[in-house]
Image (tube, helix red, strand yellow):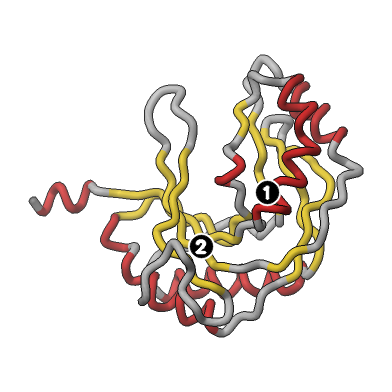
Amino acid sequence: MNEETQEATVRVFIALAPPDDAKDELERELLPAYEAYPRMRWNRIEDWHITLAFLGELPVTAVPPLRGPLAELAATRRPLELALRGGGHFDERVLWSGIDGDLEGLHRLATDVRALVRECGIPYEGRPLRPHLTLARARRDDLSSVVETASALAGFEGRAWHTERLHLVGSNFGRGPAPIRYRDIEAWTLGGRTGAEGRPS
Protein backbone atom coordinates (compact mmCIF):
# COMPACT_ATOMS: atom_id res chain seq x y z
CA MET A 1 0.00 0.00 0.00
CA ASN A 2 2.84 2.40 0.86
CA GLU A 3 4.50 1.60 -2.46
CA GLU A 4 1.30 2.47 -4.33
CA THR A 5 1.06 5.80 -2.48
CA GLN A 6 4.63 6.69 -3.40
CA GLU A 7 4.02 5.93 -7.05
CA ALA A 8 0.81 7.96 -7.34
CA THR A 9 1.68 11.25 -9.03
CA VAL A 10 0.00 14.16 -10.76
CA ARG A 11 1.41 16.85 -13.05
CA VAL A 12 0.60 20.23 -11.52
CA PHE A 13 0.78 23.91 -12.35
CA ILE A 14 -0.61 27.18 -10.98
CA ALA A 15 -2.21 29.54 -13.46
CA LEU A 16 -4.61 32.30 -14.43
CA ALA A 17 -7.20 31.95 -17.20
CA PRO A 18 -8.79 34.51 -19.54
CA PRO A 19 -12.58 34.91 -19.31
CA ASP A 20 -14.74 33.19 -21.92
CA ASP A 21 -15.43 36.31 -23.99
CA ALA A 22 -11.71 37.07 -24.32
CA LYS A 23 -11.09 33.48 -25.41
CA ASP A 24 -13.96 33.69 -27.90
CA GLU A 25 -12.38 36.81 -29.39
CA LEU A 26 -9.05 35.03 -29.95
CA GLU A 27 -10.81 31.92 -31.23
CA ARG A 28 -12.48 33.99 -33.97
CA GLU A 29 -9.07 35.37 -34.94
CA LEU A 30 -7.73 31.81 -35.22
CA LEU A 31 -10.53 30.41 -37.39
CA PRO A 32 -8.54 30.73 -40.67
CA ALA A 33 -5.61 28.90 -39.06
CA TYR A 34 -7.86 26.13 -37.73
CA GLU A 35 -9.05 25.54 -41.30
CA ALA A 36 -5.61 25.88 -42.89
CA TYR A 37 -3.71 23.71 -40.40
CA PRO A 38 -5.99 20.95 -39.08
CA ARG A 39 -2.98 18.71 -38.36
CA MET A 40 -1.56 21.11 -35.80
CA ARG A 41 -2.05 19.94 -32.20
CA TRP A 42 -4.45 22.66 -31.08
CA ASN A 43 -5.04 23.11 -27.37
CA ARG A 44 -8.68 22.99 -26.32
CA ILE A 45 -10.02 26.51 -25.80
CA GLU A 46 -11.35 25.60 -22.35
CA ASP A 47 -7.77 24.68 -21.39
CA TRP A 48 -6.18 28.02 -22.34
CA HIS A 49 -4.26 29.44 -19.39
CA ILE A 50 -1.36 31.65 -18.32
CA THR A 51 1.07 29.55 -16.30
CA LEU A 52 2.53 31.23 -13.21
CA ALA A 53 4.46 28.20 -11.94
CA PHE A 54 4.83 24.75 -13.50
CA LEU A 55 5.56 22.28 -10.71
CA GLY A 56 5.96 19.17 -12.84
CA GLU A 57 5.05 15.71 -11.66
CA LEU A 58 4.39 15.58 -7.92
CA PRO A 59 3.32 12.88 -5.47
CA VAL A 60 -0.41 13.29 -4.89
CA THR A 61 0.35 13.78 -1.20
CA ALA A 62 2.26 16.99 -2.02
CA VAL A 63 -0.82 18.71 -3.44
CA PRO A 64 -3.15 19.20 -0.41
CA PRO A 65 -0.60 21.31 1.55
CA LEU A 66 -0.65 23.86 -1.29
CA ARG A 67 -4.35 24.61 -0.93
CA GLY A 68 -4.39 26.65 2.27
CA PRO A 69 -1.43 28.87 1.37
CA LEU A 70 -2.74 29.46 -2.16
CA ALA A 71 -6.17 30.39 -0.78
CA GLU A 72 -4.53 32.90 1.56
CA LEU A 73 -2.45 34.35 -1.26
CA ALA A 74 -5.48 34.75 -3.52
CA ALA A 75 -7.33 36.50 -0.68
CA THR A 76 -4.68 39.21 -0.56
CA ARG A 77 -4.52 39.93 -4.30
CA ARG A 78 -6.69 42.20 -6.39
CA PRO A 79 -7.54 41.21 -9.98
CA LEU A 80 -5.02 42.17 -12.67
CA GLU A 81 -6.02 43.91 -15.89
CA LEU A 82 -4.56 41.95 -18.79
CA ALA A 83 -5.19 41.47 -22.52
CA LEU A 84 -4.24 38.99 -25.24
CA ARG A 85 -1.96 40.62 -27.81
CA GLY A 86 -0.21 39.37 -30.94
CA GLY A 87 1.42 35.98 -31.33
CA GLY A 88 4.73 34.22 -31.53
CA HIS A 89 6.41 30.84 -31.31
CA PHE A 90 9.05 28.91 -29.39
CA ASP A 91 11.54 27.06 -31.62
CA GLU A 92 9.02 26.97 -34.48
CA ARG A 93 7.19 24.25 -32.55
CA VAL A 94 4.93 26.00 -30.03
CA LEU A 95 2.42 28.69 -31.02
CA TRP A 96 1.42 31.27 -28.43
CA SER A 97 -0.50 34.50 -27.94
CA GLY A 98 1.19 37.27 -26.00
CA ILE A 99 -0.03 38.93 -22.81
CA ASP A 100 -0.29 42.69 -22.33
CA GLY A 101 -1.51 44.93 -19.51
CA ASP A 102 -0.35 44.88 -15.89
CA LEU A 103 2.74 42.79 -16.53
CA GLU A 104 4.48 44.15 -13.45
CA GLY A 105 1.63 42.87 -11.30
CA LEU A 106 1.69 39.56 -13.16
CA HIS A 107 5.40 39.12 -12.47
CA ARG A 108 4.91 39.97 -8.79
CA LEU A 109 2.14 37.40 -8.49
CA ALA A 110 4.25 34.73 -10.20
CA THR A 111 7.20 35.51 -7.93
CA ASP A 112 5.04 35.17 -4.82
CA VAL A 113 3.41 31.97 -6.07
CA ARG A 114 6.81 30.41 -6.68
CA ALA A 115 8.08 31.47 -3.26
CA LEU A 116 4.97 29.93 -1.69
CA VAL A 117 5.60 26.66 -3.50
CA ARG A 118 9.13 26.50 -2.09
CA GLU A 119 7.83 27.34 1.40
CA CYS A 120 5.51 24.34 1.09
CA GLY A 121 8.55 22.12 0.66
CA ILE A 122 8.36 21.66 -3.11
CA PRO A 123 11.70 22.43 -4.80
CA TYR A 124 11.09 24.96 -7.55
CA GLU A 125 13.65 26.17 -10.04
CA GLY A 126 11.45 27.07 -12.97
CA ARG A 127 12.37 29.33 -15.84
CA PRO A 128 11.79 33.08 -15.59
CA LEU A 129 8.19 34.01 -16.39
CA ARG A 130 7.54 34.70 -20.08
CA PRO A 131 3.86 35.71 -20.10
CA HIS A 132 2.05 33.87 -22.87
CA LEU A 133 -0.91 31.62 -23.63
CA THR A 134 0.00 28.40 -25.48
CA LEU A 135 -2.31 27.70 -28.42
CA ALA A 136 -0.87 24.75 -30.35
CA ARG A 137 2.13 22.59 -31.14
CA ALA A 138 3.33 21.75 -34.62
CA ARG A 139 4.14 18.31 -35.91
CA ARG A 140 7.79 17.85 -36.76
CA ASP A 141 7.05 17.65 -40.48
CA ASP A 142 4.97 20.85 -40.52
CA LEU A 143 6.84 23.56 -38.61
CA SER A 144 5.84 26.26 -41.09
CA SER A 145 2.26 26.12 -39.80
CA VAL A 146 3.30 27.62 -36.45
CA VAL A 147 5.51 30.30 -37.99
CA GLU A 148 2.83 31.39 -40.45
CA THR A 149 0.07 31.44 -37.82
CA ALA A 150 2.24 33.47 -35.43
CA SER A 151 2.83 35.98 -38.21
CA ALA A 152 -0.90 36.22 -38.91
CA LEU A 153 -1.54 36.91 -35.21
CA ALA A 154 1.02 39.72 -35.02
CA GLY A 155 -1.61 42.46 -35.31
CA PHE A 156 -4.17 40.91 -32.96
CA GLU A 157 -5.24 43.17 -30.09
CA GLY A 158 -7.74 41.64 -27.72
CA ARG A 159 -9.86 43.63 -25.32
CA ALA A 160 -8.74 44.24 -21.75
CA TRP A 161 -10.12 41.94 -19.03
CA HIS A 162 -9.61 41.31 -15.34
CA THR A 163 -8.26 38.10 -13.88
CA GLU A 164 -10.85 36.33 -11.75
CA ARG A 165 -9.30 33.31 -10.06
CA LEU A 166 -6.06 31.65 -9.15
CA HIS A 167 -6.12 28.05 -10.41
CA LEU A 168 -4.34 24.97 -9.09
CA VAL A 169 -4.44 22.65 -12.09
CA GLY A 170 -3.67 19.00 -12.73
CA SER A 171 -2.91 17.72 -16.20
CA ASN A 172 -3.65 14.35 -17.71
CA PHE A 173 -1.25 13.39 -20.48
CA GLY A 174 -2.86 10.08 -21.34
CA ARG A 175 -1.06 7.64 -23.61
CA GLY A 176 -0.12 7.57 -27.24
CA PRO A 177 -1.62 10.38 -29.33
CA ALA A 178 -4.21 11.33 -26.68
CA PRO A 179 -4.38 15.12 -26.27
CA ILE A 180 -3.44 16.84 -23.02
CA ARG A 181 -6.38 17.43 -20.69
CA TYR A 182 -6.46 19.78 -17.72
CA ARG A 183 -8.73 19.96 -14.70
CA ASP A 184 -8.94 22.37 -11.81
CA ILE A 185 -7.91 20.76 -8.56
CA GLU A 186 -9.15 23.94 -6.90
CA ALA A 187 -9.58 27.62 -7.78
CA TRP A 188 -9.88 30.74 -5.65
CA THR A 189 -11.38 34.08 -6.64
CA LEU A 190 -8.85 36.87 -6.24
CA GLY A 191 -10.02 38.87 -3.26
CA GLY A 192 -10.82 35.91 -1.04
CA ARG A 193 -13.85 33.96 -2.30
CA THR A 194 -13.44 30.33 -3.37
CA GLY A 195 -14.03 29.81 -7.09
CA ALA A 196 -16.89 27.78 -8.48
CA GLU A 197 -14.62 24.83 -9.22
CA GLY A 198 -13.08 24.84 -5.77
CA ARG A 199 -14.15 23.88 -2.30
CA PRO A 200 -13.87 26.02 0.82
CA SER A 201 -10.42 25.65 2.33
Residue 62 x/y as whole percent = 31, 63
Residue 84 x/y as whole percent = 78, 53
- Tag of residue 25: none
Residue ranking furthest to the right: 155
* Amino acid type indicated by mark 2: His
Q: Nearer the viewer, residue 24 or 89?
A: 24
Q: CA distance from mark 2 to mark 1?
A: 15 Å
Specify whether 118 is left or right of 43.
left
- Tag of residue 167: 2
Q: Nearer the viewer, residue 143 or 124?
A: 143
Q: Residues within 10 Å of mark 1 (few under 14, many from 20)?
A: many
Mark 2 element type? strand
Q: Is residue 109 visible?
A: yes
Residue at x-position 61% and y-position 80%: 77
Is residue 155 depicted above or below 178 in this figure? below
Is residue 110 depicted above or below 28 in this figure? below
* Amino acid type indicated by mark 1: Leu
Residue 191 x/y as whole percent = 57, 81
Is residue 95 depicted above or below 163 in this figure? above
Residue at x-position 72% and y-position 40%: 27
- Look at mark 1 in the image and give the residue it sits on: 133
Q: Is residue 123 visible?
A: no
Q: Quadrant of the C terminus?
A: bottom left
Specify whether 113 is left or right of 200.
right
Residue at x-position 73% and y-position 30%: 92
Specify whether 163 is left or right of 193.
right
N-terminal of the pair, mark 2 or mark 1, is: 1
Residue at x-position 46% and y-position 74%: 194
Q: Nearer the viewer, residue 26 or 153?
A: 26
